[in-house]
Image (cartoon, rainbow, N blue to C red):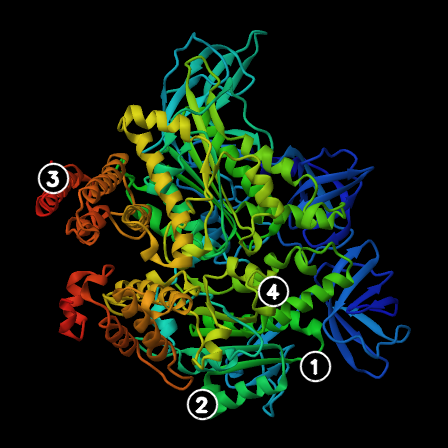
Amino acid sequence: MIKEYKTITEVVGPLMLVEEVENVKYDELVEIEQANGEKRIGKVLEINQDKALVQLFESSQGLKLPTSKVRFQGKSIELGVSQDMLGRVFDGMGRPTDDGPEIIPDKMLDINGEPLNPYARDYPAEFIQTGVSAIDGLNTLVRGQKLPVFSGSGLPHARLAAQIARQAQVLENDEGFAVVFAAIGITFEEADYFIKDFRRTGAIERAVLFMNFANDPAVERISTPRMAITCAEYLAYELGMHVLVILTDITNYAEALREVSAARKEVPGRRGYPGYLYTDLASLYERAGRIRDNKGSITQIPILSMPEDDITHPIPDLTGYITEGQIILSRELHMRGLEPPINVLPSLSRLKDKGIGEGKTRKDHADTMNQLFSAYSRGRDAKELAVILGDAALSDVDKIYAEFATQFEERYISQGFNTNRTIMETLTIGWELLSILPRTELKRINESYIDEFCPTPQTKEV
Amino acid sequence: MGQAQNIQNTNKTGTVVKVAGPLIVASGMADVQMFDVVRVSERRLIGEVIELRGDMASIQVYEETAGLGPGEPVYLTGEPLSVDLAPGLIEGIFDGIQRPLASIYAQAGDRIARGIDVPKLDYEKKWKFKPVAQVGDHVIAGDVLGTVDETEAVLHRIMVPNGLEGKLTWLFDGSANIQEPIAKIEKTDGTVEEVKMLRTWPVRRGRPYNEKLAPDEPMVTGQRVIDTLFPIAKGGVAAIPGPFGSGKTVVQHQISKWADADIIIYIGCGERGNEMTDVLMEFPELADPRTGMSLMKRTVLIANTSDMPVAAREASIYTGITIAEYYRDMGYKVALMADSTSRWAEALREMSGRLEEMPGEEGYPAYLSSRIAEFYERAGYVACLGSDERYGTVSAIGAVSPPGGDISEPVSQATLRIVKVFWNLSADLAHRRHFPAIDWIASYSLYSDQMNEYFDNHVDANWSKQIQETMQILQEESELEEIVRLVGVDALSFQDRLTLECSQSIREDYLHQSAFDDVDTYSSLKKQNGMLSTILDWYHMGQKALDAHVLFNDIIQMTIRERIARMKYVPEDKVDETYKAIKNQLEQEFLALMEGSGNID
């Protein structure tokens, strides 16, 4: 028999104080029932003797202190999971919002998960083809990686994310591939774009969507990504699927954390975000990965908009320290009309070396990647110099590099949001671009690869 | 030692009154001492007392506290947080409070379950103990009683425990586990004490030594930019701050792999789980260039990944350095990597916040810098305890992850006040894919002078002169670059342009080093010297050639430069002959150029 308390003494923002409680446990799920039977949920944030501080996961609006009843559930927040969740749409707390039937859970799982023993992890090493050259060719995504997209307001990260969700596949086969999508505090229109895009392309069949809209209570956002990842863990580790988790937008999540932290009057860290932001973000991101002797995998693509495009802002900064690289969208490239506007130079995939090369993509992949990076970097420098000093100031070689940079952006990066390129197509375009350069400049490529793959023989000598 | 036994003996003394995340407040704790270990609730979660007020104690719990509530019991152990020291540490991978992750995996599966009680070391395994001391000897603390082949690469010396002195009356010879007696020592008061291989030591207290000495020998890392420009001494301390993506972890991994240390302690503190997995999978496959043995045979890993409980992160640093000191006491050269100390500092901050302490800068506790200083001061070059004049070192290399790469923040600043070597990783270099992205202008090593003297005597008498010139060329480059940016490269004299070419060659052909190339990943000092001197030879001859009116373009288009650029890929065993050939060709080509311009003297 669960006890009911009518001893709520305070409600401040998302926090509620219940007194004279007994046997309450830290992190326990709390249910609050209004006089009219309406139920809300929260969790215990702190217990001090007989006082429990409860964080609501829903708005406190309309909460009446004397008549509300509080029940402590004796367990953490759980999500009922089942294979039938594929193809369905849920709200931020895991309740179905489409017209489908209720989910009959196969299992109830604690949404906080438990830390993964590093000893139990398997190192991510399998290539995922996203069909986007700037990612596949230069910042390769591998199965079990967490690779965020750093964007800014007004940049087309939603379109890129939808494109990846639609096109992503593992090379050898496509069995058991699923997408779990968590919308965290995004607008209806943005969410609608995703749902429509998933429906249009049929991707919805293999997707589970969790939607928390901008006008949903902010505190609910703290649970939404955890719901999504818990669902992903079930699909991956229990059903053996390869799951791609897309979380958008982490900035909204961090702001919800800050709201709760401020309400608790905690000592703030940088920019008012709580000191434990790193730990908290890690508790989401680190749930990506692969487990030994387990077929499934979880690959995460969190999306976050950098306030004022500032990469040193705590949210992108701490994210970058946890994730295995980052894909950065550039406002400048977006203005110039590149689709997707991925700035490949500061972008990075830390695990790419394990996912490319012979037997995975092709043996020349690593060398051409390094050469493309260095050539593009030099070409961009040359173009900048030309802006200041005029074209005449460039040496002959630098002029070729400038031309290379221009073509690289047009042909390699700007492929459009609806083009799906195989890795072989990406590598071919890479070689076509490299053949603009004289052969002597291709220092980072093994000679034998140049002979084998370079399309135009005239580059042998200048 | 035997924490499990102690728990059974202890009575419940405290009662939980408050739970807030990893912080628990308990009442009825009058008998407890500061920093004692306690077990919380029937789940026996491990915690440590960090504050006492009357009979109330604040406890930081090293495991997830969900499900705990007021009224639950707190058991005392009467012991501070300690590590077990005995054969079996090497090749181990432990969490922040020395629980072997492999045992946890065997017991609990993929996830780290709570309240799990696994022995810190294998208490049953038999080790072959070979006596060294003689029965009848008078022994003092630190004297070697006997040895155990812990791995093929590490000879574990069993020493007389600290605080014990007397006559050795019995010494074991044969196989024993670490809890069995291996020696008996009669103290001056006539009592006899049994000695086992297993020791415990409280992690927050440095292990004693006879004397601390100034470091005088370099720790060769095989990384050219480090050994040549910013060397670290054995027993030295270094910091690597840098924004994310600048390659901190790769530098740390490279040093763990190739540094000429006997023992490597690698602490993954609040970092990525996959990175630890990478180390776990890669190290056993790599061979130590000195012994030819697998690198894992000299390595201890401590992993507290960022999803593991935050309080144990704070402890992991101390666990690591205590183990490092233990091997130092055996007379070994130990290198300790801590990646990243910023996460450790953040764990301090989080606990401090929950204790409602008055915050210092950026919310960090006011005692941050003294804690950082305490930690790094435990590194050093010491004369060990014992009568056989052993010397051991602990070199500590800490990564720092400054927010936004801005090192004006408190953790970086507190670290820089202590460390002698500063390898500043630059985001700009990293974006250009110049790795290791150690900025040659901003970094420094205060050991340079002593180390260069060592290199002059042991590698090449010209070493320090070369280094000086290299630094000067790089410095000049950064000044010339300014001019080029303003007025273009044509405005420079050919002498200056040659300097630019040379510095480019130093940067790309020498300082740039690929950690992923089988050959380039490690360069011996001999190879480093050969490479650098060849590049400088080209520069010197080039200067002479310019004076002799050889065309600038002819100098920079010399075919030898291609070979110079590929010097880094020459395997160690071919270095002598190949470099000699390159130097020969270099001279021939210059001779030809001079002849061509008719200016041979």
Q: Residue furthest right?
A: A66
Q: How far from the left and from the top, in percent, is residue B435?
A: 37, 52
Q: Position of residue B448 (x, y in %)?
A: 41, 31
Numbered label attached to residue B238: none
Asked if residue B362 can be seen in this view, the reply is: yes
SS for dot 3? helix
The amino acid type of the residue labelled 2 equals Gly
Callout in the foreground (2, 3): 3
Q: CA distance from mark 1 to mark 3?
A: 75 Å
Q: Chain of mark 4?
A: A
Q: Quadrant of residue B472?
A: top left
Find out whether the residues at labels 4 and 2 contact each other: C-beta distance under 8 Å: no
Mark 1 is surrounded, within 10 Å at the Cα level, by few (under 14), some (14 to 19) or many (20 or more) other residues, namely few
Type of amino acid at the residue the image marks with label 4: Asn
For disc 4, the marked residue is A112
The kind of secondary structure element at disc 4 is loop
The N terminus of chain A - image quarter: bottom right
| Residue on which the image places disc 2 | A202
Mark 2 to mark 1 CA distance (whole Å):
28 Å
Q: In the displayed structure, would residue A87 be above or below residue B317?
A: below
At label 1, the amino acid type is Asn
Within 10 angstroms of label 3, few (less than 14), some, or many (20 or more) residues?
Answer: few
In percent of width and height, residue B396 lies at: 48, 36
Residue B42 visible, this orientation: no
In the picture, the disc for residue A215 is 1
